[in-house]
């Protein structure tokens, strides 16, 4: 399985090298208002598109797994920062760990994100926007709602527009918690890795079908200075659609059905997604 995902990563590098010269502008420069189409509304895979000038986005996602009974709700706000090249966002979470019987639900860890548009934009064939994240241990690790310590995360999203109808997104990232805790306050460093890919079919400008594939491996503390590693692999078909209202407001609902494979075969779940994207005067950036 690991060999298969290393092959996925190598394929990504080959695609990048093949498309590195294909930086033709599609239609509009990134400082234009967002189009009526859907671009940055995936559920599990991150796109490499920063927010347009003067436009902010509010994203709500709820995911529940049926076998483990885990669920997580996240709320993310994305803002352009001074120029289109820079974006900041804040992710708040609430979750429930099914393996902690009777623990109930509560506040999860908080993520403060910064993303730099190193190449391209939502209007180009190839876009790259690496992200750096600080993870704050606001969740109660005793009930499985958080890591118990400060952490750092990085992700490299790459987006490729192959044609007017087909887009793919590719992710590779890692998470590091230097002092993670378990419910008994045992401490150890924990490392995680994620690889992901999605294929999006633009059936119409306002209706998209997508299939996302996400593989993660992570460590959990089991004793002082000792961790156990687990892996998850999900294939998630989904649909998203848009409502374009007056004054530039775009509402995008979506639903997906993640299905476990390999190390988590037999697991299944549901994802509900809702995005509000609209112009906001205080988010206007300076000209590049």
Image (tube, rainbow, N blue to C red):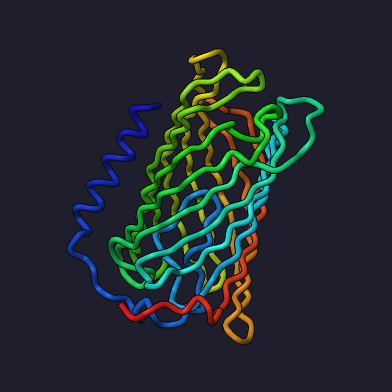
- Residue pictured at 59% horizontal, 31% vertical: 148
Image coordinates of residue 9 in percent, x first then y, are 31, 40
Residue 67 seen anywhere in this rendered image of the structure: no
Image coordinates of residue 144 in percent, x first then y, are 67, 30
- Residue pictured at 67% horizontal, 48% vertical: 73
- Residue pictured at 63% horizontal, 41% vertical: 138
Q: Report the front residue among 124 and 167.
A: 124
Q: Which quadrant: the C terminus?
A: bottom left
How many marks the image carries: the answer is 0
Q: Which quadrant: the N terminus?
A: top left
* Left or right of 139 in this view: 17: left
Q: Is residue 189 above or below residue 174?
A: above
Residue 133 seen anywhere in this rendered image of the structure: yes
Image coordinates of residue 88 in percent, x first then y, are 47, 61
Q: Is residue 83 above or below residue 188?
A: below
Q: Report the front residue among 5 and 61.
A: 61
């Amino acid at each position: 399985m690991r060999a298969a995902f290393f092959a996925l990563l190598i394929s990504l590098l080959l695609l990048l090298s093949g498309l590195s010269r294909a930086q033709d502008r599609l239609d509009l420069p990134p400082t234009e208002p967002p189009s009526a189409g859907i671009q940055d509304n995936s559920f599990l895979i991150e796109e490499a598109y920063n927010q347009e000038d003067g436009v902010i986005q509010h994203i709500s996602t709820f995911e529940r797994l049926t076998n483990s009974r885990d669920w997580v709700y996240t709320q993310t706000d994305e803002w352009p920062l001074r120029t289109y090249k820079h974006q900041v966002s804040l992710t708040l979470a609430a979750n429930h760990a099914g393996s902690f019987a009777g623990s109930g639900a509560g506040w999860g860890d908080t993520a403060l994100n910064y993303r730099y548009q190193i190449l391209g934009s939502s209007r180009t064939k190839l876009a790259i926007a690496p992200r750096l994240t600080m993870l704050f241990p606001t969740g109660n690790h005793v009930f499985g709602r958080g890591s118990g310590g400060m952490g750092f995360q990085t992700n490299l999203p790459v987006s490729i527009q192959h044609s007017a109808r087909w887009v793919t997104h590719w992710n590779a990232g890692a998470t590091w918690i230097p002092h993670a805790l378990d419910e008994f306050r045992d401490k150890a460093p924990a490392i995680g890795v994620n690889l992901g890919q999605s294929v999006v079919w633009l059936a119409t400008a306002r209706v998209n079908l997508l299939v996302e594939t996400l593989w993660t491996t992570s460590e959990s503390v089991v004793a002082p200075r000792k961790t156990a590693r687990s892996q998850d692999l999900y294939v998630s078909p989904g649909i998203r659609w848009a409502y374009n209202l007056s004054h530039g407001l775009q509402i995008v609902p979506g639903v997906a059905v993640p299905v476990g494979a390999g190390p988590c075969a037999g697991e299944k779940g549901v994802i509900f997604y809702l995005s509000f994207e609209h112009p906001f005067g205080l988010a206007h950036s300076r000209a590049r």
